[in-house]
Image (cartoon, grey):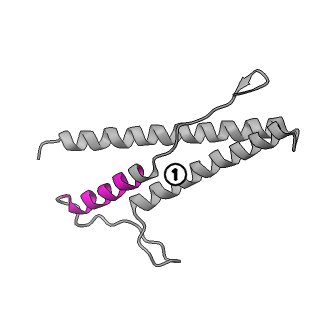
Amino acid sequence: MQIGSLPVFHPPPLRLDQLTRIGKEADGQIAGLPGAGGLALPTHTEAGTKSSFGNFLDQAVAEVDGKMHTAAAEQAKVLTGETNNLHQAMIAMQEASTAFSLMVEVRNKLVESYQEIMRMQV
């Protein structure tokens, strides 16, 4: 789909279950590492719950998903004629695109780091 001569970005669907599973596995592996006895994850004092890498990933994916929904809503408003703020819709779409790209790059670095750790000899 295009708006005028500008292509509209349609990212592939997010796989939240995969990211959550990887985060939970990473939490368990960090706790089980030799020499990680002094390694503790920070806790949230206001909720009294322990934060984890899986929770961090959930929040990050939810934030990116929110940006995607906002961009889609802005795009729909422009296409239906509800508003004529094309610049606001384009800004929202670029923000969502950048956030998604950042999330993919962070995922790639995490997978690469995990693979490097798995290749280490003990």
Q: Main secondary structure of the magenta part?
A: helix
Q: For the point 87% across and 39% down, which residue is it?
A: 81
Horizontal and vertical percent for residue 25? 30, 56
Q: Is residue 74 magenta?
A: no
Residue at (11%, 47%) from the top-left corner? 122
- Look at the picture and state if 8 lies above or below 42: above
Q: Position of residue 94 (x, y in %)?
A: 67, 36
Residue 46: x %, y % from top left: 53, 77
Q: Quadrant of residue 55?
A: bottom left
**Foreground pick, 115 / 1:** 1
Q: Name the element at disc 1.
A: helix
> Does the magenta run of residues contain 29?
yes
The outermost residue toward the top is 5
Mark 1 sits on what residue? 61
- Left or right, 42 with respect to 1, comes to left
Q: Which residues lie in the magenta part?
A: 19-33
Residue 36 position (above or below residue 68): below
